[in-house]
Amino acid sequence: MEFDQALLEIFGELDRDRLMERVVRYARDRVDASGSSVFLLDDIAGTYVLQATTGLQDATEATPERRIEYRPGEGLTGWIAKHGRALRIDNVMDSQELNRIATDLQWSKKYSEIASKQGRAYLGVPIMSRDGTTVMGVLRVSAKRRGHRFTEADERLLSTIAQMVSIAIENSRRYEQEKRRARYFQLLLDISATLNPRRPLNEMLNEVANRLQRGYRAEACQLYLRDENYTSRLILRAASGLPEELLGRVSYKIGEGLIGYVAESGQPVRARERDETGGQLTDQRDEQTAQLAHFLPSGRYKSFLGIPLVLGDEVHGVLALVNKIPSSPGHRDWFTQDDYEYLALLGTELTAVLESGRYLRALSEVGVTALRMQRIASFGTLAQRVPHETSNPLAVARLALANLRTDIQALGTSRVGRETDTARLLRRLDVIETQIEEVSSKLLNLVHFSQQMGFTHATVQWNDIVREALIWLAAERRRRQVEIRATYGELPSLFIEPNELFGVVVVLLQVMMEGLGPEGGLIEVYTEAVGPAQIVRTKICCPHPRLKQVVAAIVEPPATANQDLSPLHFEWALARQTVEQQYGGTLSWSTSEEGTVCFAMDLPAHKESI
C-alpha cells in the first residue's frame, strides 16, 4: 500500500472528530465504496458507538442528536467487534449468505451509510489495539461503486487501513488525555485560589460548585455536608444546575441513595445508566433523586460521579457531578478516570479547607469562652475584694466622724456664744455622713450584682443561644456518638443574660448525654412560643431504656447518696435556681409512659419578669 498525502494527514491529525472524518473518507475512496462509517468502543458501556460517517442515507432511527451504538454480537458491526474478524458480504439482505458465513450472523437493520432497498455489498474490519488483545472499533464500507461485491484485495486493503488507523487513534487519545489533564489542572488551580477558610462558607461552596459544573461539562454539581445537629444526615449546602431554593432542604440519610452510599462506604462511585439493557443508574424508590432529576435537562440521572470528602477517618460530606454533557454526538457521556482523579484532588483540598474553617470557628468559640470565664473570674474577685477593701475604710471613716461630732459638741458647750458655729459644723458632718452611707449602699449593690449575675442583660434571639450551645458541644457529641435533631419555632425576643442561660442549656444537654452512656443515641431539641403571655419553651428529649434511672440519680439523688453526688447534680441545681430566681421561669424534667425523658424550661418573654 503506497503512502499518500491523505494518509499522512490522518497520522498528523490529533483532534478526534477531524481524525474520524478523514478516516471514513479515506476508507471510502481507497476501496471505491459508496459509504463508510467508523465505530469506537465505549469503555464503560462496552458498546461500539458511531464516531463518523460519510452520510446517513438509510437510518430511520439515526439522527445527528441520537447516539448510534451496537452491543458486541449485535448486527454485522457487533459481530465483527465480538469475534475480532473481518466480514465481507455480497448482499446483506440475503439471509442464506449470512447463515453460510456464520450461524450467529444477522443484519440488525439499525443503520446503513447507503440505501439498502436493493441489497448492497458490505465490508467491515476490526480496529485492533496495538497489542492485538482489544477490538478498539470497527471500520466498515458499503456498496462497491463499480461492481456488486468487495474482493479479497479490498478486504486486505481495508484491514491495512484499520491497522494504521489504530495507531492514529491511540495517538489522538493520548493527546486528548493530556489536553484534558492540562484543562483539569488549570481548573484545579483556579478553584484552589477561591478556597479560603475565612470566606463565608456558603459563598465559597457555591462558587466551587459553579466552577466544577462548567469545568467538567456536567448538568449539575451537588455538594453535601453533614448536618451538625443530626450527623447521620447529609444536607445539600451548595449546587449548580439546580434551583437555589433546594439548598438546605434536600437531604440524604447515611446509606440512602447514591449520595448516602458514598458517605457510608467512604468510596467514590462512578456509574452510568444502561438504557438498552434495562439497567437503571438510580433506584426509583429514592424519592430525593427522583425529585432532583426533574430539574435536570435530561430529566433523569444518566451518569454520575461522586466522591467522599474525607479527612482522616471522618467523612465530612459528598461532592457529586451528574450527567456528563458530550461535546458532540458520539462523544463520551460518562465520567472518566481522569475526571475522578482530579475531582478527588480537589475534594481533598476542599475538605482540608472545611476542616480549617471548623478549627477557626472552634478557636473563636474558645476565645469567647475564655473571655466569659475571665469576666466571671473578674466579677467573682470583685465580689470578694469589695467587702474587704471597702468595709474597713468605711468603718474607720464612720468612727472618725462620730468622734469628731462628739468633740465638736463638747467644744460648743464649753465656749459660750459659739453655738452658731457648732451647728454649722454639725450640718456639714451630716452631709459627709449621708455621702458615706450612699457610697456604702452602692458598693453593697455592686457586691450583690457581681455575686448573682456577673454580666449584662441584652435582647437576644433564643434560637441563637440554643444553636451556640449545640456547636459548643459538637466535639463531645461526636466523642459520645450522640446525634442532635433540633426543631426551632418562631419566638419573640428575650431580655436575658445570654452567657448565663447559655450555660443552663449546656448543663441540660450534658446531663442527657451522661445518661446515654458510651453507646450514644439521639437527643431531640424543640423551641416554641406558648400561650398569650409569650412563654418561650425549650424541650430537650431523649428516648432510651436506661435514661430515666441515670438522670434521676443526677438531678434527684436519694438521701443516701450524699457522698457520691455527681458534679452535674450541683450544676443542675444552680441552673434550676438561675431560671427560677433570676428569670421567674421554670425548669423541670419528666418521663413519659414510653420511657422518653424530657427537660422543659419556660422563660417569660417580657422584661418586667426579670
Image: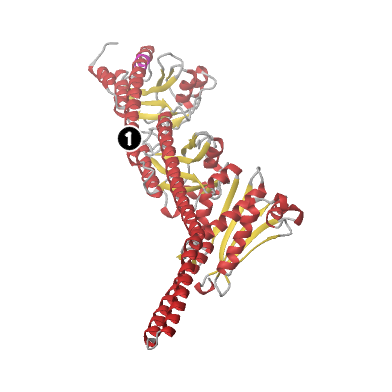
Magenta segment main secondary structure: helix
* Amino acid type, label 1: Leu
| Residue furthest right as drawn | 560
Q: Position of residue 253 (x, y in %)?
A: 56, 46
Name the residue furthest bottom: 417
Q: Quadrant of residue 169?
A: top left
x, y percent for residue 85: 46, 16
Q: Can residue 9 be spotted in the picture?
A: yes
Q: Vertical placement of 179 versus 406: above or below?
A: above
In percent of width and height, residue 129 lies at 41, 17
Residue at the image position 64 percent from the left and 45 percent from the top? 520
**Image coords of residue 335 (percent x, y):** 43, 33
Please tell me which residue is depicted at 51% across the width and 35% down the height of the picture. 276
Instruction: Tell me: residue 518, above or below residue 396.
Output: above
Q: Quadrant of the N terminus?
A: top left
**Within 10 Å of the Cα at label 1, are there few (<14), some (14-19), or many (20+) other Cα atoms?**
few
In this rendered view, identify the residue nearer to me: 198 or 495.
495
In the image, is residue 199 above or below residue 426?
above
- What segment is highlighted magenta in the picture? 158-162
Comparing 402 with 298, the one in front is: 402
The answer to whether 209 appears left or right of 594 in the picture is left
Residue that badge 1 annotates? 189
Q: Which element is circle 1 on?
A: helix
